[in-house]
Image (cartoon, helix red, strand yellow):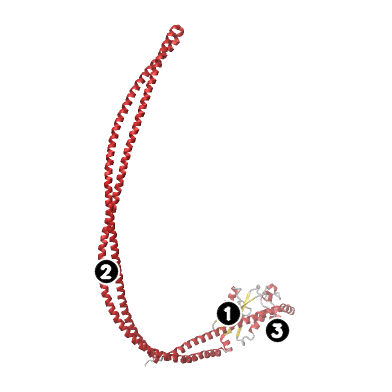
Amino acid sequence: MKSYQHFKFSTKILLIVGISCLICSGTSIGMALYFAHADLKKGIEEKAATIHSRLEAATEFVALQGGLKPIVERMKGKYKSDTEMSDNDKLEVLKQVPIFAAMKIGAKDAEAEGYSFRVFSDEPRKKENMATDFELSIFKKFQENKELKKYVHDDGDSITVYRPVRLSESQGCMTCHGAPATSPWGNGKDILGYKMENWSDGKLHGVFAIKTDINKIAALREVDKNNLKTVLFGLVPIVVAIALAFMLIKGSLDNLKKVAEILSGVSSNVASTSQQMKSNSTDLSQSNVEQTASLQQTAASLEEVGAMIKKTSDYAGSTSKASSISREKAEKGSDIVEKMIHSMEEINHSNENIRSEIDHSNQEFSEIVKLIHDIGNKTKVINDIVFQTKLLSFNASVEAARAGENGKGFAVVAEEIGNLARVSGEAATEISGMLDNSIQTVERIVHDTKVKVDKLLTEGKTKVEYGSSVARDCGEILEEIVSNVKVTSNMALEISNASVEQSQGISEITKAMGQLDVVTQDNTHTSQELSSVADNLNNDAIELEKVVSDLLKTVNGAA
């Protein structure tokens, strides 16, 4: 890195451009080689799939020819057992087997086309077709998943494409692998002498494998030459880019050098200006400090005056509040006195009503006396009736005596009537006496009650009138007190309002002083910031001068 610092700026740019182009080209070449290799693998897989399709087509074609059954019948007629068949006849039979035809086609020209063909099974008729452990795992994949039509294995050096081979009754597979009872020789063996397995239609019998060596195919396609061409074509843009970069930056570097020289002069001017700004900000900061001290002293004095006015306002408010409470109490007392006067008047009115009721009761007592007099008069009538009854009883007794024996009954009746008249007379006399006594008693009670009630009413009226007079005097005095309290309360309220206004005025002044103090402090802070800015500007000027020096070194290269 130290040696890199001694390079000129143009050299550094050319190095950067060259390295960048090298990285980009390397990435592009790598991606091109990667995709070319991927296309190669894809082509191998497609070719293997094409071969498999060709084998399937051959299998279908041989099966459609239907030559297996006729040749089996012909061999049965020609020979008595499979042991008598010649190798040529067995080969003729195999040529009519669809799978055998596919195996022959798959193996033909395999080496020339760069691949190898193999068929394997878990139960082969030939030992060389027995599946290895790995092939057996592939076999089981097709066995477990009947929908799987192809499996590709890539180990890096080669690509193997596998296809399943399943028995098909329509293709004649059951002729050799079906039920032993259908043996053409009647011994459970097929036409070629192999034991018939009694397999069913659709059973997985084997797997075709087409293995391709990637390196061989790459050699056949001359991939290495193509890759070399790709690398060479990728390096050409690097050379072109470096040449273009050199031509383009030459003029710009000259301009950059001029700019660096101009910046060097500007940095000197900035340093001088920053020193002057720092001096001015120091003077401004000192003035703001002195102004702040004066404002703080004035604000403190205003706060003390405000506190005194606030205390006076609080006292005035308390006085106003007490006056208001006294006025409310006096007004309440005046209302109570008025209610008491009203109650006394109602009591006086009630006394008058009582007197009226008593007079009414006396009248009713007089009516009772009159009624008793009437009862007495009626009693006199009863006495007259008793007298007449006695007289009639006497006359009846006289007449009964004259009648002699026949008038005895009348004499008894007359005697009883006389007794009854006597008893009635006695009762009437007693009632008359009781009525006289009642009349006297009632008249006496009425007289005594009237005298006592009159006396009580007179005394009550006198006391009520006196109480009413005293209550009126109290009411007049309370009205005077309420009037005086109202005046005092209004004066205290005015004092309180004036104190509040004064307190608000002092608060506004204090607030204004506080704001002025804040402004002064802000100015002080601003001057301090200005001083800091001047310092920073000075530092920036020094840094700018250093950067310009570094820029000149970068453009011209370190000495």
Residue drawn where x is 29% and y is 37% of the image: 461
Query: Image quadrant for the N terminus?
Result: bottom left
Q: Is residue 322 visible?
A: no
Cα separation between marks 2 and 1: 95 Å
Near-viewer residue (466 or 538): 466
Residue drawn where x is 32% and y is 85% of the image: 271
Q: Which residue is mark 2?
A: 299
Q: Which mark is residue 281?
A: none
Q: Helix, strand or loop at disc 1?
A: strand
Tag 1 or tag 2, which sits nearer the N-term? 1
Q: Amino acid at mark 2?
A: Ala
Q: Are marks 2 and 1 in contact (CB under 8 Å)?
A: no
Count of labels in the image: 3
Q: Which mark is residue 152?
A: 1
Q: Amino acid at mark 1?
A: Val
Residue drawn where x is 29% and y is 47% of the image: 334
Q: Is residue 274 left or right of residue 16?
A: left
Q: Which residue is mark 3?
A: 88
Near-viewer residue (331 or 240): 331
Residue drawn where x is 29% and y is 65% of the image: 507
